[in-house]
Image: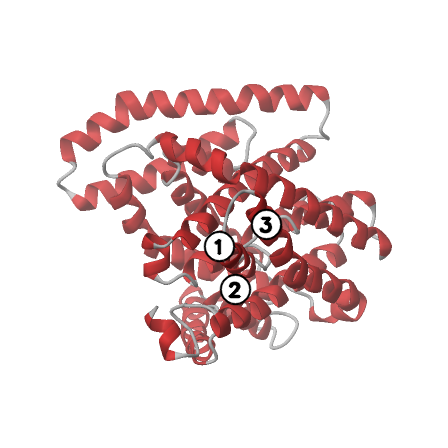
Amino acid sequence: MSAQDNIVFSLFLIFSGAAILSTVALWTRQSLLVGYMILGLILGPSVLNWFSDASEISQIGEIGIIFLLFLLGLHLEPQNLLHMFRKATGVALVSSLVFMALGVIVARIFSFTWPESWIIGAAMMFSSTIIGLKLLPTTILHHQHTGEVMISVLLMQDLIAIISLVLLQGEQLGGVSLSTILLLIIALPALLLVAFIMERWILRPLLARFDQVQEYLFLIAIGWCLGMAELATLFKLSAEIGAFIGGVAIAASPIARFIAESLKPLRDFFLVMFFFAVGAEFDIFSLKIIIIPALVLTAITILVKPWTFKYLLRWSGESKKVSWEAGVRLAQGSEFSLLLASMAAGSQIISNNAFSLIQAMTMLSFIISSYWVVMRYPTPLAFKENLRRD
């Protein structure tokens, strides 16, 4: 009998194992996400086979991505959007095109199909919002300019990721034809309109009336997030896009910050499941086929991204020190790369080998990037005491 036949035992294995490997990860100055994925790899079909089918865990874990996008939307107030567009649009767009082109070229060199190459290229565009922010000390995040620069670039990348998911959604609907594009052009504004109408005439009065009952606010936030996710599926969009729009719709609310803080533990619970499933779904035996392109893409991610961001940020007016540090902190793959690859594999747009390639590149870049950052810059996990205090 496999572990997932008993849900309590499954959760025990996942979270107890995650606690153990998280301890190891923190001791070795690694991101916790790496520990979750390694745990999935150990317990999954490739090693112990205690979770012979990680699809159910993966579906539960995708709720974490829904909450992640909802929380990202909560931080996109209109005034912040305008500032972000002025600050980071050029840097994010040019860097994304550079990384996509490199990814496509490498994929074609190793004989992947054109659809697979485009997905691999798209997966190369993004840096990890979770790792980027979790390796920033509070002082940098709130008081220093490096944090502001990073967050601007990451938020612009998140918007590009949303557009990529929309395009992939169009491919799932039968190809990015004119009718599909028109459907998406109509669906997105319609969903936005419904979200802002509901926020103005239903959600806002309820929040104003009962804002002193924190449990009620917590329930309303979850219901709104998941409700918008389901509404998006009715509009033929993905649940993740709906959650993002739901967050944007209430970003200007006075209690948006409280909602963001209260939902973080719930988001983290489901993200453990998501990254565990990523590791469990990884086919370790595919490494003999994809190891060389995976190493090439990882090298590009670790070595080319810092220099690209450095020159683009210098061009935008940032100092040499800030530009280089921000580039190093952004030199990894992303959870959006995994989500994009998972959606593409589920729709059979890419093969299992292409999916494994993106997974391997992302995991390797997480590990190497985390070590580079904690050895060189202030982080909560820094090797040196003076870096932990900065």
Dot 1: what SS?
Answer: helix
- For marks 2 and 1, give the CA distance: 8 Å
Q: Amino acid at mark 3?
A: Phe
Residue drawn where x is 27% and y is 24% of the image = 202
Determine whether 378 is above or below 133 in the image: below
Using the rendered image of the protein, determine whether residue 125 is visible from the camera's viewpoint.
yes
Q: Residues within 10 Å of mark 2 (few under 14, many from 20)?
A: many
Q: Which mark is residue 156?
A: none
Q: Amino acid at mark 2?
A: Phe
Image coords of residue 50 (percent x, y)? 56, 73
Dot 3: what SS?
Answer: loop
Q: Amino acid at mark 1?
A: Gly
Determine the image quadrant of residue 300: bottom right
Image quadrant in which the N terminus is located: bottom right
Q: Indicate left or right for 334 with 82 as reference.
A: right
Counting residues from the start of the chain, the first of labels 2 and 3 encountered is: 3
Q: Indicate left or right for 208 with 282 as reference.
A: left
Q: Which mark is residue 276?
A: 2
Dot 2: what SS?
Answer: helix
Q: Are marks 1 and 3 in contact (CB under 8 Å)?
A: no
Q: Which residue is mark 3?
A: 126
Q: Indicate left or right for 170 with 327 as reference.
A: right
Image coords of residue 242 (percent x, y)? 47, 34
- For marks 2 and 3, give the CA distance: 21 Å
Residue drawn where x is 44% and y is 72% of the image = 18
Image coords of residue 379 (percent x, y)? 41, 68
| Residue nearest the observer in this picture, 161 or 154 | 154
Determine the image quadrant of residue 219: top left
Q: Are marks 2 and 1 in contact (CB under 8 Å)?
A: yes
- For marks 1 and 3, give the CA distance: 20 Å
Q: Are marks 2 and 3 in contact (CB under 8 Å)?
A: no
Q: Which residue is mark 1?
A: 61
